């Protein structure tokens, strides 16, 4: 079963949930707002994708960071920021076997899940 991480009320998450349900793809949802993110998971994601791929630099949470934080971002600082403010992580984040899929695009999901 695939694992879906994110925030339940996010519009992009809702699109992904709808697509998965209409495609009869079972999933288990993990809500960042309810403690689904932990240091071990985040380490795996950073090691696999890099913090740059995980961070949504177009979102309001990123824009609220100081210029100093943005300009000096490293794996260690990114880990701290992502753990403290998981809403900065691109959504949804889907784990399917050994693959991690970020975001929602119906055409990509069709290829990945068919």
Image: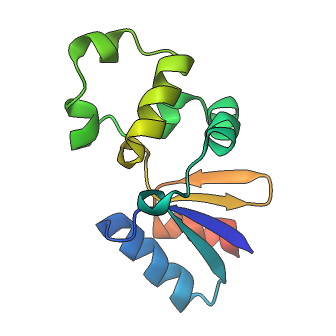
Q: Note whether residue 23 is visible.
A: yes
Report which quarter residue 25 is drawn in: bottom right
Quadrant where the C terminus sits is bottom right
Quadrant where the N terminus sits is bottom right
Q: Residue at x 47, y 19 (%)?
A: 77
Report which quarter residue 97 is drawn in: bottom right
Q: Residue at x 66, y 45 (%)?
A: 41
Q: Is residue 87 left or right of residue 60?
A: right
Where 72 sits versus 111, above or below?
A: above
Where 88 sits versus 67, above or below?
A: below
Colour option used: rainbow
Between 106 and 37, which is closer to the camera in this rendering? 37
Q: Is residue 74 left or right of residue 112?
A: left
The x and y percentages for residue 38 are 60, 46
Between 40 and 14, which is closer to the camera in this rendering? 40
Q: Residue at x 69, y 70 (%)?
A: 2
């Amino acid at each position: 079963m695939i694992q879906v991480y994110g925030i339940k009320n996010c519009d992009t998450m809702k699109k992904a949930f709808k697509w998965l349900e209409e495609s009869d793809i079972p999933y288990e949802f993990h809500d960042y707002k309810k403690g689904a993110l932990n240091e071990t998971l985040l380490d795996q994601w950073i090691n696999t994708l890099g913090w740059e791929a995980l961070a949504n630099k177009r979102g309001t949470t990123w824009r609220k960071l100081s210029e100093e934080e943005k300009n000096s971002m490293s794996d260690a600082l990114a880990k701290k920021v992502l753990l403290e403010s998981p809403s900065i992580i691109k959504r949804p984040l889907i784990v399917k076997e050994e693959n991690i899929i970020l975001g929602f695009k119906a055409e990509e999901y069709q290829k990945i899940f068919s």
